[in-house]
Amino acid sequence: MAKLRHIAIATKDPIKTAEFYKKAFDFREIARTPMGNPLADGVFLSDGTINLAILNFKTDQLGKGMDFTGVHHFGVLVEDADKAMEKLEALGGECFMRPSPEERMGYFEIKFRGPDGTVFDIAEHPWGGSAPLDSETARLKEPQPAK
């Protein structure tokens, strides 16, 4: 079974918003977006199961304007991204951002719109601070720490 492992919140002040959630719920800061990231600036938090991205987006992915704030999209961890993409497209899901073959060599997300326009990601690798899938196949695909 695929697992919900990522939620992205759009905000104009990612640091202030992240500090609120860290203090309110004791979430851990996992990372910040690298300088010059073309998609968004932000902070990534975790409760140990789900990755919470607090982002100031640089493009209007939702078609709601650059002033939009709130829940932006969610991410689902899948065992096989190619099979999931085929199934989603057969069900009418619209893939609007897929990685090139080179990008798929590392961490990647594939972005879709559901039938109501809701944006979601699928990925084979857990988001930072999120829990893996509970299967042997998924564990074999997880990035291994450098030795």
Image: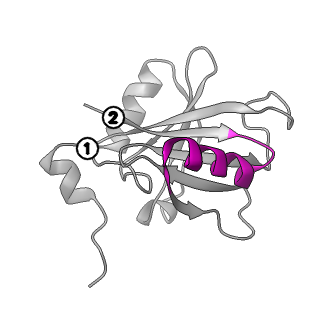
Of callouts 2 and 1, which one flags the residue occurring earlier in the amino acid sequence?
2
Disc 2 to disc 1, how far (Cα)?
7 Å
Relative vertical location of residue 3 with respect to residue 30 in this rendering, above or below: above
* Label placed on residue 133: 1
Relative vertical location of residue 18 with respect to residue 60 in this rendering, above or below: below
Q: Residue at x 33, y 40 (%)?
A: 78
Q: Residue at x 28, y 49 (%)?
A: 132
Query: Which residue is denoted by mark 2 in the rendering?
Result: 3
Relative vertical location of residue 1 with respect to residue 138 in this rendering, above or below: above
Q: Which residues are magenta?
A: 10-28
* Label placed on residue 44: none
Relative vertical location of residue 89 with respect to residue 23 in this rendering, above or below: above
Which residue in the rendered view is the most extreme toward the left?
136
* Mark 1 crowdedness (10 Å alpha carbons): few <14, some 14-19, many ≥20: many
* Mark 2 crowdedness (10 Å alpha carbons): few <14, some 14-19, many ≥20: some
**Which quadrant is the C terminus positioned in?**
bottom left
What amino acid type is highlighted by mark number 2?
Lys
What colouring method underlies this structural image? one colour
Magenta-drawn stretch contains 23: yes
Percent of width and height locating residue 87? 37, 27
Percent of width and height locating residue 85? 42, 35
Magenta-drawn stretch contains 147: no
Percent of width and height locating residue 23? 58, 48
Q: Secondary structure at mark 1?
A: loop
Q: Residue at x 63, y 56 (%)?
A: 43
**Which quadrant is the N terminus positioned in?**
top left
Does residue 59 show up?
yes
The rendered magenta stretch, by its main secondary structure, is classed as helix
Q: Residue at x 64, y 20 (%)?
A: 117
Which residue in the rendered view is the most extreme toward the front?
23
What amino acid type is highlighted by mark number 1?
Leu
